[in-house]
Image: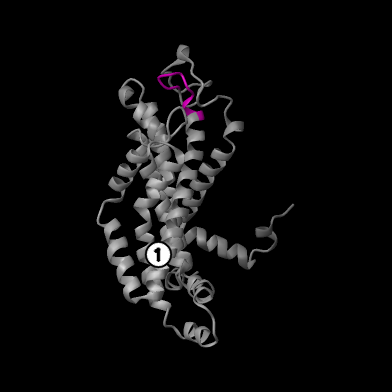
Amino acid sequence: MLGLPMLFPDFKPLRQVRLRVRRQPLAVLGVLLLSLFVGCGLAAPWLTPYNPASIDLLHRLQGPSLHHWAGTDELGRDTLARLLYGARISLAVSVCVVSVSLSLGLAIGGLAGYLGGWVDTALTTFAMNTFQALPGILLAIAFAAFLGPGFSNLVLALAIGGWAGYARLVRAQVMAVRDREYVDAARALGAGGLRIFFRHILPNIVQPVLVQAAIGMAGVILAEATLSFLGLGIPSPAPSWGSMLNDARMHLFDSPHLVVFPALAVAGAVLGFNFLGDALRDELDPRTRLELGL
């Protein structure tokens, strides 16, 4: 049976897809990488018969083979199983952290940008600038050490260190559109502040926020791997790419697969989110779309 490209070679949606693939190959690669990680994480119980926490000392430090495609670690645990289940943890942490940080950024940055005056001064000077004056990863390490290891504590520690960047971006975008004609018209018709913000301002500032959120997920994956590497992330025996790298330090030369596979997983996920952020920027920016001929 002939497919749509054969039956309708000039079918407009298909031509647009082909044009995007030619103009943005890295975006396609990013979507494929993220789809691979999400699919592998969701289908982990069906992709591997091994329990990621099951110890088998008789088969420790084995290289890749037909029984263990990515080898085993120092406790005999299947590396591939730990990679697949670790994808769940890394993606869940990134989504939760960005959701919390973005929510705080929208609330605080929206208030500062829309109200202005002393509210803007207080929130910008004493809140945003204070948190941005400290390196985000050091702030996350400090809070993670204080709160202790765990999924919720890890999300809270990373969100505390990352919300200020979203708040500053939202503030700048709100200040750029709060005095536009359509906002003045809504205000003249008696619309309240919340209605104006969510109905008229937020839809017009969501584009750069989405791009920043996509790129921020890449940073969260790196930060989660860093904290887990330091023992401040997800506690054992839960699989985490950062903790896998930490466990592999002592076997860097005799079992290099223990380092290579988790490092490739972290790099692939980070590249996927960065490519996705670039694609969203090109897709949502009218000037970039015009330059690319989209």
Is 114 drawn above or below residue 52 in the view shown? Answer: below
Residue 66 lies left or right of residue 160; in this view the side is right
Q: Which residue is mark 1?
A: 108
The magenta segment is 72-81
Is 247 drawn above or below residue 293 in the view shown? Answer: above
Which residue lies at the image location 51% right of the left edge and 42% below the top edge?
37
Residue 265 lies left or right of residue 15; in this view the side is left
Count numbered badges in the picture: 1
Q: Main secondary structure of the magenta part?
A: loop
**Is residue 6 or residue 180 the one in the foreground?**
180
Which residue lies at the image location 31% right of the left edge and 23% below the top edge?
250
Q: As drawn, which residue projects farthest toward the left?
A: 133
Which residue lies at the image location 25% right of the left edge and 57% below the top edge?
133
The amino acid type found where label 1 is placed reads: Ile
Residue 22 point in image, percent of width and height: 49, 59
Residue 76 in sight: yes
Is 213 drawn above or below residue 208 in the view shown? Answer: above
**Is residue 288 or residue 95 the one in the foreground?**
95
Q: As drawn, which residue projects farthest toward the right?
A: 1
Is 153 drawn above or below residue 171 in the view shown? Answer: above
